Amino acid sequence: VSALLVDASSPGLDRDLLDLAATAGCASIIVDHGLVERDWAGLGATAVLPERFDGADLVATLERASRPLGSAIAPTTREPEPGTKDDAESRIVSVTGAGGVGTSTVAMGLAHGLAPRVDGGTVLLADMALRSTQALLHDARDVVPGLTELIDGHRLGTPNEDEIAATIHALPERGYHLLLGLRSERDWVSVGARALHAAWDSLTGAYPMIVVDITGEFDGAEQTGSSDIEDRNRLARTAAHHSDLVLAVGGPHTWGVNHLVRTVLALVEIGVPPERIVPCVNRGPRPPRARAEISAAVAELLAARVADARHIPSPVFVAERRAVEQSLRDGLPLPQNLYEPLVGAVSSLLEHVSASPTRSLEPVPIAPGSLGTWSDDD
């Protein structure tokens, strides 16, 4: 198709539709009735026609904005890889792991601990997990507005600072701001790729430090052959690709260590550099010998599966504290000795990694014989 002619009031018109047309090499021409002011060029439209136009206007616009087709073969469409923002002002730490290992509590403690260390700004705790729990942990009476409203606000424009702030909850008693997550796991179907990336850029432009709580599931079309699974995991994949550090949370026992290693392997598989992945053992033991045994087990398991496993930092241990449950129940800050080691390790690692990570496009060596063999007869 040479061009997409779409009425400005069509309910399906948004950033993702215009991006899909552009990916397919198709010009998007908006018929604007003028009732709502939109930055159509900023949203990705190729041209704009007034509500009343004649055939000559349409032909002139098509000649200027679209291309003639030499055949009836449609170009192959695909969703572009998540990009990174141009500016590198904010630092982003994602926290992920299997269900039941305390990922959300670790993210909550990390945001509280980092808050006093940020100069001239505020820490944002963003709940982007499929099964969001930050509203429960913070005893949020109202779950609106949140992530859904923030993304919807970027479908047909870019909200101003006041409109963005209206979707975020300030928590002065904890020292950080909170972006509530999806109200239902199935709400991922409303998260469009372009609108999500635009919302992400707005958050990174507003906060110097962002802690993101994400689900430990990262499979995409490349791993499964299913674009639906990639769409379902879009929140986690986007956060992981944009983060300066990703904390992979596990537990101290066999089940927890197994899921910790699996989370690290999943992050490496989607292209997160090993040096940006930080293993974290929640409810870890106190004796140094027990910690050393867990660290050795994690290192051995990763060395067998990851080529650059030596670049993965040593596990960070978050000790068990009985006061955590009471703090959550009473709405009090988490115990300081719970998150201090975690904050210290994250702050130190952030000083040694560059901002705005990008996926490496450098060629990689191929093991001799791994591509098979052929002969002249073949």
Image: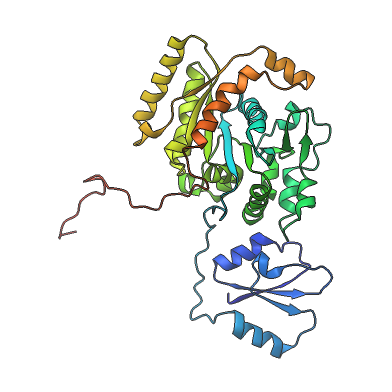
- Is 102 left or right of 165, judged from the image as shown? left
Placement of 200 over or under 173, stated as above or below: below
What coloring was used for the rendering?
rainbow
Q: Nearer the viewer, residue 104 or 33?
A: 104
The residue drawn where x is 58% and y is 77% is 2
The residue drawn where x is 51% and y is 17% is 252
Q: x and y percent of residue 272 in the render?
A: 47, 42
Q: Quadrant of the C terminus?
A: bottom left
Look at the image and tell me whether residue 313 can be seen.
yes
Q: Nearer the viewer, residue 317 or 3?
A: 317
Residue found at the far front of this picture? 119
Q: Quadrant of the N terminus?
A: bottom right
Q: Quadrant of residue 46?
A: bottom right
- Is 358 left or right of 374, judged from the image as shown? right
Q: x and y percent of residue 288 in the render?
A: 46, 11
- Is 191 left or right of 251, judged from the image as shown? right
Placement of 378 over or under 5, stated as above or below: above
Residue found at the far left of this picture? 376
Q: Nearer the viewer, residue 250 or 202?
A: 202
Look at the image and tell me whether residue 101 can be seen.
no
Q: x and y percent of residue 178 in the render?
A: 73, 37
Give the total number of marks visible in the rendering.
Answer: 0
Q: Quadrant of residue 135?
A: top right
Q: Quadrant of residue 53?
A: bottom right
Q: x and y percent of residue 232 in the render?
A: 60, 44
The residue drawn where x is 65% and y is 87% is 59
